[in-house]
Image (spheres, coloured by chain):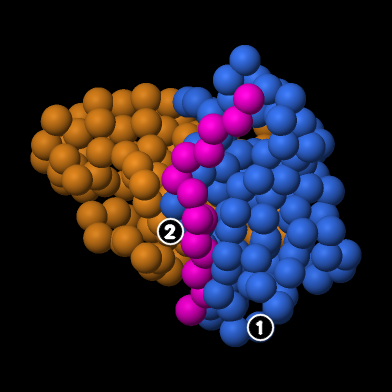
Amino acid sequence: AQSVTQLDSHVSVSEGTPVLLRCNYSSSYSPSLFWYVQHPNKGLQLLLKYTSAATLVKGINGFEAEFKKSETSFHLTKPSAHMSDAAEYFCVVSEWNTGFQKLVFGTGTRLLVSP
Amino acid sequence: NAGVTQTPKFQVLKTGQSMTLQCAQDMNHEYMSWYRQDPGMGLRLIHYSVGAGITDQGEVPNGYNVSRSTTEDFPLRLLSAAPSQTSVYFCAAGQGTTPAFGSGTRLTVV
């Protein structure tokens, strides 16, 4: 079975400084990986996805993530944090099971951005 | 284009009551699924469907029933609500590289 580990439950940064949210995955074959963002009391929005094309994936709002197979990592980065980036972020790996692609979620990382 | 629509957005139930969480999609996806979100646990799969008339259990199916009579709708039923079912519920449609989620239903069972 595939799994995802988000290494930090909370990350605090100052506005204008870089953001790094860490994610390691476990998969027996080439995975599809996603990052979703959830703003307070809102639904889930897809930030970016990796599907075995380019290893550096660019997403919305200036976020990007790099797939590193040797490290089994898919860390999310942004060069300069904005107050509006404060939210919870989920790293997700997909798992195929009897014809259905199940999404396996990490436990989430809450990003706090201070002025 | 509404995408995935969930109703209601909020609900309070008493223990033992029943209710149905509604989910509708207008993207003509065959695949639909229900997840629950609890603090510190991410989202966990409750039930899923690969097409009209076909459903299967996910990771945490106990206490929930589903049916899929049309491509558009995938309701989630709680037959006898329990406090352990207090959670935020998300419906998703599609799979592959772009599964889309509804905005969620926040359910409290007292």
Q: Which residues are magenta?
A: A1-14
Can you give x and y, in whole percent of width and height, for residue B109 in the image? 19, 34
Residue at image point 19% right, 45% down: B84
Q: Is residue B35 visible?
A: no
Residue at image point 43% right, 26% down: B9
Q: For mark 2, name the chain.
A: B
Can you give x and y, in whole percent of width and height, for residue B105 in the image? 41, 33
Residue B45, disc: 2
Label 2 and label 1 in one chain? no
When asked about the image quadrant of residue A9, the answer is top left
In blue, which chain?
Answer: A
Residue at image point 32% right, 56% down: B65
When asked about the image quadrant of residue A111, the answer is top right
Disc 1 designates what residue?
A29
Residue A104 magenta-highlighted = no
In orange, which chain?
Answer: B
Q: Give the residue at the far bottom of this rendering.
A: A28
Disc 2 crowd, CA 10 A, few/some/many (<14, 14-19, 20+):
many
